[in-house]
Image (cartoon, rainbow, N blue to C red):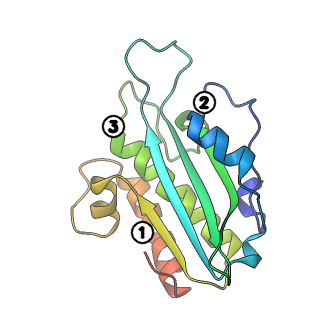
Amino acid sequence: HYMCDSDILPLHDNIPAVKLHPAANWATSHIPARPASDAKELYIYSDGSLPGEGHRDDHQPAWAIVILGLDALGAFFRVGHVASQLPFSGAVFKPTDSVASSTVELAALLWALVWYSCAAPKVPVHVFSDSLTAVNVVNSIWSPRSNHDLVALIDVLLIRARNMHSTY
């Protein structure tokens, strides 16, 4: 429901084991949110995370996206953010005993593109990832070794995004 609203809303703390970094908590509580329609450009930051050693059993691989806007005066503002554990992110994520970091990074890119496709902003949109593997796979620089269905879905959304004249 949140992903297809014209402006996504922050999630509440009731998602199991998705814990925001303290800096993310500060940003989501102190940076004012404004609608995407106030932006002359949008920036989507994506990230995926695997549970660290020694975490409780309820920690799962997870992903997040944060959407920022830049207004006509050059001020950044928060549009919204979404985060989820991988098992709750859709049928394209097949349950396995081991999940690669590239899978959660690709999941974040997928949901960034889903938001973009649904919101269809009329301004340039820039999507960022800290995963060289994910970026090279979705830009067809590297061939995927796994996640073929996920990469195929991302390819479809990228074609749609490119047809909407945004930059990546």
* Element under disc 3: loop
Which sits in the foreground, 148 or 22? 22
Question: Which residue matches tag 2?
Answer: 19
Rendered image: mark on residue 46: none
Q: Left or right: where does residue 139 sit relative to residue 69?
A: left
* Element under disc 2: loop
**Amino acid type at image mark 2:** Lys
Q: Residues within 10 Å of mark 1 (few under 14, many from 20)?
A: some
**Amino acid type at image mark 3:** Ala
Q: Residue 138 at what x, y percent from top left?
A: 35, 64
Question: Which residue matches tag 1?
Answer: 155
Q: Earlier in the sequence, mark 2 or mark 1?
A: 2
**Amino acid type at image mark 1:** Asp
Q: Earlier in the sequence, mark 1 or mark 3?
A: 3
Question: Which residue matches tag 3?
Answer: 100
Which residue: 56% across, 56% down?
111
* Element under disc 1: helix
Q: Left or right: where does residue 132 sit relative to residue 107?
A: left
